[in-house]
Image (cartoon, rainbow, N blue to C red):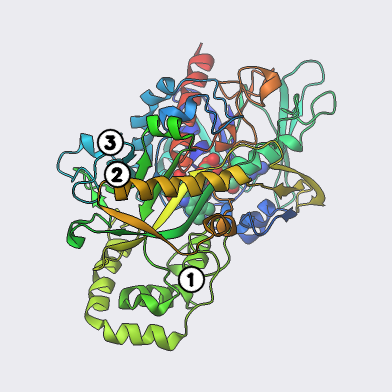
Amino acid sequence: MIVVGGGPAGIVTALARAGIDVVLLESGHQKFDLDAQQLSDAADWNHRRHAEMSMAVRRQVGGTSVIWGGRCVPYDPIDFERRDAVPDASWPIAYDELVPYFQRSCDWLLCGRSVWDVAGLPHLPQSIVPGLPNSEVRSSTFERWSLPTNFGREYRRALEATPGLRLVTGLTCTQVVIASVDRRVDHLATRGLDGREVAVRGRRYVLAAGGLESTRLLLASADADGVPIGNHSDHLGRWYMGHAEGVVANVRFNTPPEQTIFDYERDIDGIYVRRRFSFSEEAQRRLGLPNIVAWLANPSLSNPAHSSGALSFAYLALASPLGPLFAPEAQRKSLTGGSVPGSPYGPSKPGPVRAHARNLMHDSRATARFIAEFGTGRFIARRRVPGFFLYSPTNTYPLQYHGEHRPSWHSRVTLARNRDALGVPRLRIDIRFGAADIDGVVRAHRHVDEYLRLHGRGALEYFSPDVADAVETHIGGGFHQIGTTRISRRPEDGVLDPDLAVHTFDDLFVVSSSAFPSSGQANSTFMVVVFALRLADRLRRELAR
Ligand SMILES: Cc1cc2nc3c(=O)[nH]c(=O)nc-3n(C[C@H](O)[C@H](O)[C@H](O)COP(=O)(O)OP(=O)(O)OC[C@H]3O[C@@H](n4cnc5c(N)ncnc54)[C@H](O)[C@@H]3O)c2cc1C
């Protein structure tokens, strides 16, 4: 079996397929290499709506997990239902079929037990502030945090030592070549930046090159009729989704401030978890809402009006020339007020350095404590504290949302004329967010506000009266690459069958978030690993016969 791509999807597929010989083909190397990285650059993209590829993917062993945040969240049962709020999202498999893989996915991601609600963890408070019931709006659900796990580093020994597994680096798959007589793969054409050209053959081929790169590879590979492989019904490259993300309001609670759960909590195994507001499935159906969640966040770091020495210190450290040492570029830029599509606050003019310095001086004790505690938790502990959150004595927190992006036929990637250094056409990215995406975010806020008021626990305070405009300003994607090789029962409706095989092929598979017909509220990687495990099981059964 040949697996293309050494990110989480490829590494899990390759390591979980015990008993079958596998070649894991990775375009990058163990360490970052700029020439390899630039193979992923797009030719053209809508800059306001999509991150540039250098920030959105990594070409090296470990893939984008080298720079990811580590947030682990499964999809919800409602994502698999037909919903009026999200037409054009149809899953050909049932949620219950995937649940048995959740604990295994947690194990690979090192994020603890497959428990996602405090109802399963009685040692934690049941809601985010005292007395707020978990009914239509819930604050009992949480996400889990991985180490964050760099798959290349974590599984390096296993990749080197597992019998029957061969990791080949520095070799890029440039085309899937089809046998002329039947719908089978003949070989993968691969090339190295050093001039090597190798035809790679196996019994099964798994593309695990990331959401956009797997799609690009199919678009660049014609079948016997000259049609890009998988584009039998014009779905390949379409339905491109990310998430709707941002901050347009503060939430002000009127409960005792010291009882608000504003920070990470730890579960019984010491794993970091974080509360979110979410809507019950019944409320989503009744209100016609997309799936959306929200967390309590920090005020914008770059604006010294927050008066916090800790936040000013974090801002100055990230904005300094040493900043890239502390956070991946996307996160660093977004936290320092740079222009990153989908970032919580959008671009902002940073406050003067002297105002930040004043915060450091006035708040020096708290700043010193922050540096010692966060520095230890972040840079010395094996399970790194994923971030930091500031207590608000006024019980007021920015509310950061992460919501479903509705699939749209017109949101798509295509090939440009422009080619990379190995001759593969680069991508042209045209991601689209529509009025319904914006409206979903606005209405979700309205319902959270009403819910807090109804139960006398607080209210939202919007940053601007035109909420829709504020949502529209920030909305963008690129970090979760969903939908462009969607699964479907019938070839007419998608690119892959429910088992991830390209429709009408039985030896070519894609394992990636690009297979998902909807984006849900969840960051993609947890479910990518679920699907990789499911595929590895299937291939093991099939090939071991
Ligand atoms: C800044 C940032 C933060 C993120 N935070 C989170 C988070 O908190 N939670 C979450 O769930 N997700 C997060 N993500 C997304 C997460 O990183 C991806 O979902 C995950 O890495 C996808 O895994 P993958 O294996 O499918 O693809 P990738 O990790 O992108 O791996 C693909 C691999 O394929 C290789 N490759 C590409 N093309 C070829 C080719 N033609 N031939 C051979 N090899 C090839 C690449 O070099 C790479 O190693 C984040 C992403 C970014 C950029």
- Mark 2, Cα crowd under 10 Å, few <14 / some 14-19 / many 20+, is many
Disc 1 secondary structure class:
loop
- Regarding residue 150, the answer to whether it shows in the image is no
In the image, residue 236 sits, relative to residue 537, either above or below, namely below
Whether pointer 3 and pointer 2 mark residues with C-beta atoms closer than 8 Å, the reply is no
Which residue type does callout 1 highlight?
A: Thr
Disc 3 secondary structure class:
loop
Q: Residue 526, position in %: x, y?
A: 43, 38
Whether pointer 2 and pointer 1 mark residues with C-beta atoms closer than 8 Å, the reply is no
In the image, residue 515 sits, relative to residue 401, either above or below, namely above
**Which quadrant holds the N terminus?**
top right
- Residue 359: quadrant of the picture: bottom left
The residue wearing badge 2 is 139
Q: Earlier in the sequence, mark 3 or mark 1?
A: 3
Q: CA distance from mark 2 to mark 1?
A: 29 Å
Q: Residue at x 18, y 59 (%)?
A: 256
Q: CA distance from mark 3 to mark 1?
A: 34 Å
Q: Nearest the camera: 477 or 325? A: 477
Disc 2 secondary structure class:
loop
Q: CA distance from mark 3 to mark 2?
A: 19 Å
Which residue type does callout 3 highlight?
A: Arg
Q: Nearest the camera: 479 or 396? A: 396
The residue wearing badge 1 is 336
Which mark lies nearer to you, 3 or 2? 2
Q: Nearest the camera: 200 or 235? A: 235
- Regarding residue 121, the answer to whether it shows in the image is yes
- Mark 1, Cα crowd under 10 Å, few <14 / some 14-19 / many 20+, is many
The residue wearing badge 3 is 113
Q: Residue at x 53, y 72 (%)?
A: 348
Which mark lies nearer to you, 3 or 1? 1
Q: Residue 43, position in %: x, y?
A: 75, 54
